[in-house]
Structures are given as structure tokens and as C-alpha cells.
Image (spheres, helix red, strand yellow):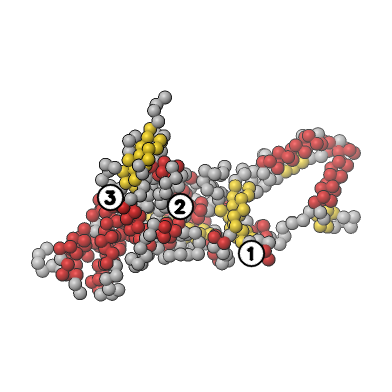
């Protein structure tokens, strides 16, 4: 990655990866990884606005606390850290 | 004798026995912990994550259903972290659930109870169903399923059948049969246990749905003994009190809570689904006695019993007690069968007594 990369796209790629890798056993990871990908996709496409994106912090907290394994516990990081370090990229 | 083991539960010192899980212990002490995938008949799964509690010294919240109580532990079943966990977890569940469906839904009552946010939006369900399954009893509504796997584990661990199992992975995980076959083409015995253990109404009974029967909350449970065989399973007839002009009608049945009756919450296909005979037009509801005209006539129980007694006594007096034979039914309870043999042996003095299940 370099300065030319769209951080939303980079985060989305990783969210899709985690969603595909989620085994489905525990709900925080199974639903959460789907939620985050859906939230960012809707934000990027402009459809449905940012109503899901507003709850990302709470969903990420839940995935970290509630998931059984390391995948679910960290799957939200690409999005939460992108939001934290590159907030300007999420301004519409 | 070893000293009783103790731990601290929400600051109170409580005793426990080896093998107790934190959930069992907390429930026994009257603490409230939500749980969706737990069933006392099943091995703990720790999959629904609703029962997580805080244990001092542990970095992560732990599933109380599968964490054994240990000496000196300090457990918190509430508090800021646990409360936030429940709120956000149920909030997440709500984004993956279609909402009320007219019947009992443990998930939705818990979500309300623990203050889950309902404004997190809805995700499209990616769980596949088996809408073309032609079995007459069990309907699976994949959208309502939360994959707690109570039904599949019940089918495996209690019934020993494994007709249904978790299938697929990730958000596409669903409950399915081998190759998606109809339950009729699997090892399924149609015991209906999957309906009974489902906390969200994803597994429901077909007939009451197609008939548009009232929700369980409007039905009156009547505890009774199943009369299809002599085992003595207890079941609850769920009666719509307004039906049949106020006489009431059995809309469906359910099994009592596990651990409370001999059948431990289990029923078979007959006990669970064969209740339509109750209102069948050909069912005898009054005793009949054959009159001098050779036809059967409705009569009172007193007259019918008197007629039977006269007939039996007459045969015994004319031909001796061994001219009589008593055949009872496997649909009677054990107590009723006992009374039939008592009548034969003690009242009439014959051992000519049989019951169709006593081969």
C-alpha cells in the first residue's frame, strides 16, 4: 500500500476476507463480520447512507469481547483503525 | 470428608460441587444469566455467547455454560462490562432476525430485557432453507434461525438420530439434512424435539401454522399423560379455550421442561403430533349399550357399567371365572392396566388377563 490507496477500499478488501473466513460458530463474528462489510459497502456505494457505519464502534467492541477465537476478536480492526487514522477518507 | 468448595458469586460466598458449571451454580443461586444455546440435556456448546460472565483475573469474559466452578473464583454476573456485552450482542442478533413472528421468542424477550438497541439496521439473511420439504410436521424458517444449534445437538445427543446438522459456514451456515433431503427421506423419527428446543421459532409445527391457530400466549396448557403407550410420558395439551363454542380445542402439544417429568422433555411422533383424533367426528364420546333391538344406544356411564357388570357376572356364574378373559390396551396407562389385572384376578378370580403390548 502507498499514499494513493483508497483506505476505504483497503479496509473493505480485508473485511470481505474476514467475512469469508468466519466459520459461523459464534454469533459476534458471524453476524459482526457481515455487519461491518455491509456497513462499509453501503457507505461506499452511497446507498442507505451511513446508518450502519454509525454503530461500527459498538459492533467492533462486541466482536472483540464476545468472539470465541482470534479471527473474530480482530476482524473489526481494518475498519476501526481506518476510521481512527484516516477519518477524512470517510467524509462524503 | 473434604471441606465444601466455595467461590464468590457477585460478592457472595457460595458453595458448589465439583463438576458444577458457573451457569448451573448461578441459576441455583437465583442469579439471572441469559442463555440461548444451553439445554441441561446437552453438552455445553458456548456458541450463542449470551451467557458470558466476568471472572476476576481472566482477561476475557468467559462462557458460564462451559466454565467449571473452581475454588476461590470471583465471578460477576453483571456490571458495566457484562451489561454492555449483553446489550451489544443482542443488538447484533436483532440485525440478523426478522422480528416477532407471533409466537414465543426467547431471543426477542431477552433483547428487550437487556436493553438491546433496535436501530442497528437489518442484514439480508443468507441462510438457505428447505421450503420444499414435504414432511407433514416440521417447518424450518431459516431467516429466524440464530444457529444456536440446540436442535442439531438435541437430534444427535438426545435422540441419537442426527437427521439435521449444521451445514455450510460463516453467514451462510444453516440447519440442513444430508444433501438437503426432506426429513421423510432421512433418519428423522419426527419426534419434534427440534421444535421444542428452538428459542426463536425457526423450527415450528406446520399444522397449527397452516390453520392460523392462535399464538402460544393465548393457549391454556393442560398437563396430561400421553395415552399412546404405557410409558407414561407427560405432555401439555395447548388448548384454545375459545374454540368449539367455548368447549376448547387442542391446538398443539408441548413437552414439559426437561428434568421435571419422567420423559425429561422428550416426546415421540405420536405424543407430539397425533392429537387430531381428539375432535374427530367418529370418536366415541358417550358409552354405548346394545339394546333389545340389536342396535347400540347412547347411555350414561352408570347404566353402561351396570350392563357390563351384569354380563361379566352372568358368564362367571354360569361357566366359572375361567370362562372370562380380560384384554387391556397398551394405550392405557400403567395404573389402568394394573386395575384391569386386579379386576380379573381379585374380583373374578381368573388369570386370563392380557395386554396387547405384553407379547
**Residue A69 marker:** 3
Task: Say which quadrant the N terminus of chain B sits in.
Answer: top left
Pick the front one: B236 or B171:
B236
Tell how many labels: 3
**Residue B60 marker:** none
Q: Quote the CA–CA distance across marks 1 and 2.
A: 32 Å
> Considering only vertical position in the picture, is B43 above or below A35?
above
| Of the two numbered discs 2 and 3 in the rendering, the one whose residue sits closer to the viewer | 3
Residue where numbered disc 1 is placed: B242
The answer to whether one can see residue B172 in this image is no
Residue B270, given in percent of the width and then of the height, sits at 60, 52
Nearer-N-terminus badge (1/2): 2
Residue B342, given in percent of the width and then of the height, sits at 75, 37
Label 2 Cα neighbours within 10 Å, binned few <14 / some 14-19 / many ≥20: many
Drawn side of residue B206 relative to residue B278, left or right: left
Q: Which residue is found at the position 41% from the left and 60% from the top?
A: B112
The quadrant in which residue A47 appears is: bottom left
Drawn side of residue A5 relative to residue B355, left or right: left
Residue at the extreme left: A3
Q: Which residue is found at the position 37% from the left and 35% from the top?
A: B6
Q: Chain of mark 2?
A: B
Q: Quote the CA–CA distance across marks 2 and 3.
A: 24 Å
Q: Which residue is found at the position 27% from the left and 73% from the top?
A: A49
Amino acid at each position: 500500500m502507498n499514499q494513493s490507496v483508497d483506505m476505504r477500499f483497503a479496509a473493505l478488501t480485508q473485511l470481505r476476507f474476514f467475512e469469508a473466513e468466519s466459520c459461523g460458530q459464534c454469533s459476534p463474528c458471524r453476524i459482526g463480520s457481515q455487519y461491518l462489510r455491509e456497513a462499509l459497502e453501503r457507505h461506499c456505494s452511497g446507498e442507505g447512507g451511513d446508518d450502519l457505519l454509525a454503530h461500527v464502534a459498538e459492533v467492533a467492541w462486541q466482536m472483540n469481547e464476545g468472539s470465541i477465537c482470534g479471527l473474530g476478536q480482530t476482524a473489526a480492526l481494518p475498519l476501526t483503525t481506518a476510521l481512527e487514522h484516516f477519518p477524512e477518507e470517510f467524509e462524503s | 470428608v473434604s471441606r465444601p468448595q466455595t467461590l464468590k458469586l457477585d460478592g457472595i460466598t457460595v458453595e458448589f460441587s465439583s463438576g458444577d458449571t458457573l451457569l448451573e451454580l448461578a441459576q441455583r443461586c437465583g442469579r439471572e444469566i441469559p442463555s440461548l444455546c444451553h439445554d441441561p440435556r446437552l453438552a455445553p456448546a458456548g456458541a450463542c455467547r449470551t451467557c458470558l460472565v466476568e471472572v476476576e483475573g481472566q482477561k476475557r469474559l468467559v462462557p458460564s455454560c462451559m466454565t467449571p466452578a473452581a475454588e476461590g473464583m470471583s465471578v460477576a454476573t453483571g456490571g458495566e462490562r457484562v451489561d454492555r456485552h449483553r446489550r451489544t450482542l443482542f443488538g447484533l442478533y436483532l440485525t440478523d432476525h426478522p422480528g416477532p413472528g407471533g409466537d414465543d421468542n426467547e431471543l426477542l424477550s431477552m433483547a428487550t430485557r437487556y436493553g438491546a438497541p433496535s436501530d442497528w439496521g437489518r442484514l439480508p439473511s443468507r441462510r438457505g432453507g428447505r421450503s420444499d420439504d414435504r414432511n407433514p410436521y416440521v417447518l424450518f424458517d431459516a431467516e429466524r434461525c440464530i444457529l444456536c444449534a440446540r436442535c442439531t445437538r438435541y437430534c444427535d445427543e438426545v435422540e441419537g438420530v442426527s437427521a439435521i446438522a449444521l451445514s455450510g459456514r460463516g453467514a451462510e451456515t444453516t440447519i440442513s439434512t444430508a444433501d438437503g433431503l426432506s426429513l421423510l427421506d432421512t433418519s428423522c423419527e419426527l419426534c419434534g424435539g427440534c421444535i421444542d428446543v428452538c428459542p426463536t421459532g425457526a423450527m415450528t409445527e406446520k399444522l397449527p401454522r397452516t390453520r392460523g391457530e392462535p399464538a402460544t400466549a393465548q393457549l391454556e396448557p393442560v398437563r396430561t399423560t400421553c395415552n399412546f403407550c404405557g410409558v407414561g410420558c407427560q405432555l401439555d395439551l395447548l388448548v384454545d379455550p375459545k374454540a368449539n363454542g367455548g368447549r376448547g380445542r387442542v391446538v398443539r402439544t408441548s413437552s414439559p421442561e426437561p428434568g421435571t417429568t419422567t420423559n425429561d422433555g422428550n416426546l415421540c411422533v405420536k405424543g407430539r403430533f397425533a392429537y387430531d383424533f381428539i375432535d374427530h367426528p367418529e370418536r366415541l364420546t358417550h358409552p354405548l349399550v346394545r339394546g333389545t333391538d340389536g342396535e347400540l344406544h347412547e347411555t350414561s356411564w352408570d347404566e353402561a357399567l351396570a350392563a357390563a357388570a351384569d354380563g361379566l357376572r352372568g358368564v362367571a356364574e354360569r361357566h366359572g371365572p375361567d370362562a372370562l378373559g380380560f384384554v387391556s390396551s397398551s394405550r392405557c396407562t400403567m395404573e389402568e392396566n394394573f386395575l384391569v389385572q386386579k379386576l380379573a384376578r381379585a374380583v373374578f378370580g381368573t388369570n386370563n388377563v392380557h395386554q396387547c403390548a405384553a407379547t
